Image (cartoon, helix red, strand yellow):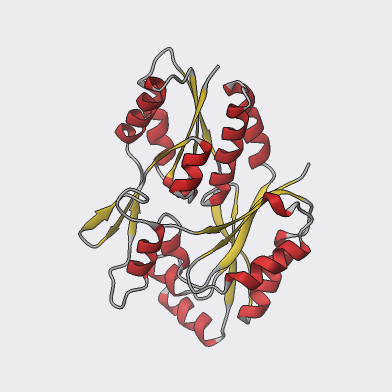
């Protein structure tokens, strides 16, 4: 049986990563004012960050992929010889993309399409898709892949240390007053993705302490695989090195990823963190 793996651009997989793994990626959209782009189609992650950090740039907004977008990719997979599809989407609580995938799957009566809510975002989602692609390449059936993804997502954690509250304010996540107080007190929040939604995991007073606390949270248990994440201007090399030094993980199973247009607007530049799948 040939199983195709589908995910969406909220996974933050690079075009090269997706191509090497044989993963089909359905793009969401990101808009800067009147201009709308498809990530990795007509807007690269590097180009997104140039626009995002430009002086007086309009704050970007994101929109879910449509059922038609998914239907087109599903058809491409079947036309390419797939007997079944496993589709892993960004958390249904963070985007309407999951609903679009389910609607599209209903259009293929009699075909096996398993749609999985990752309950995650960024490379949390991306690593699940990568794992699924490895199993598909090994000849595993869609049902076994779905079970393995469900198991892995239950062992996944994400922590990100933010450099500023400004982007959470601009994205409507917190009030301007809270952001102003946080800036005056040099508060550096640490956010997590838990059960599919973004939560405030901790708050500390300095950038160095935020990164230290983030490392503590991420490396508390043995790790199966991980992706160290960052946004631009984050001095990621030191954080990456400390993660590898302190985590109980095979360094070969640790990737380094740049957060893209789906999550980046709420984080802003200067952020570091990771998503990890803990060992059983």
Q: Is residue 94 visible?
A: no
Query: Which residue lies at the image location 33% right of the left edge and 62% below the top edge?
Result: 60
| Residue 200, horizontal then vertical, whole percent | 59, 64
Residue at image coords 44%, 16%: 111
Q: Is residue 60 above or below residue 138?
A: below
Q: Quadrant of the C terminus?
A: top right
Residues 74 and 214: in front is 74
From what the image shows, is residue 53 above or below residue 108? below
Residue 175 at x, y percent in the picture: 43, 72
> Residue at coordinates 30% horizontally, 32% vertically from top-left?
68
Q: Nearer the viewer, residue 134 or 104?
A: 134
Assign the N terminus to one quadrant of the image: top right
Q: Name the quadrant containing residue 49.
A: bottom left
Image side of residue 112 versus residue 151, left or right? left
Q: Which residue is outermost to the bottom? A: 184
Residue at the farthest top position = 110
Q: Position of residue 252 (x, y in %)?
A: 70, 51
Location of residue 206 (image quadrant): bottom right
Residue at 64% over, 24% down: 144
Quarter of the rendering containing residue 202: bottom right
The answer to whether one can see residue 6 in this image is yes
Residue 43's place in the image compared with 91, above or below, is below
Residue 270 lies, with reference to residue 249, above or below; the image says below
Count the labels in the image. Answer: 0
Relative image position of residue 176 (x, y in whole percent) = 41, 76
């Amino acid at each position: 049986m040939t199983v195709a793996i589908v995910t969406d651009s909220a996974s933050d997989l690079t075009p090269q990563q997706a191509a090497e793994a044989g993963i089909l990626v359905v793009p969401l959209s990101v808009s800067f004012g009147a201009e709308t782009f498809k990530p990795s189609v007509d807007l690269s992650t590097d180009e997104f960050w140039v626009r995002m950090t430009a002086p007086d740039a309009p704050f970007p907004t994101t929109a879910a992929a449509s059922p038609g977008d998914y239907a087109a990719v599903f058809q491409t997979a079947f036309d390419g010889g797939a007997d079944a599809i496993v589709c892993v989407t960004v958390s249904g609580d963070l985007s309407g993309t999951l609903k679009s995938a389910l609607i599209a799957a209903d259009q293929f009566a009699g075909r096996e399409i398993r749609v999985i809510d990752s309950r995650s975002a960024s490379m949390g989602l991306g690593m699940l898709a990568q794992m699924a692609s490895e199993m598909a390449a090994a000849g595993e059936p869609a049902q076994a892949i779905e079970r393995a993804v469900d198991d892995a997502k239950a062992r996944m954690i994400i922590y990100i240390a933010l450099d500023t509250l400004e982007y959470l304010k601009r994205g409507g996540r917190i009030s301007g007053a809270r952001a102003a107080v946080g800036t005056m007190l040099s508060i550096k929040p640490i956010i997590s993705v838990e059960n599919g939604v973004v939560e405030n995991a901790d708050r500390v007073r300095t950038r160095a302490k935020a990164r230290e606390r983030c490392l503590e949270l991420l490396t508390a248990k043995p790790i199966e695989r991980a992706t160290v994440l960052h946004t631009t201007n984050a001095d990621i090399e030191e954080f990456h090195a400390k993660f590898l030094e302190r985590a109980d993980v095979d360094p070969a199973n640790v990737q380094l990823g740049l957060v893209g247009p789906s999550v980046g607007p709420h984080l802003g530049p200067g952020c570091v963190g990771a998503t990890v799948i803990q060992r059983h």
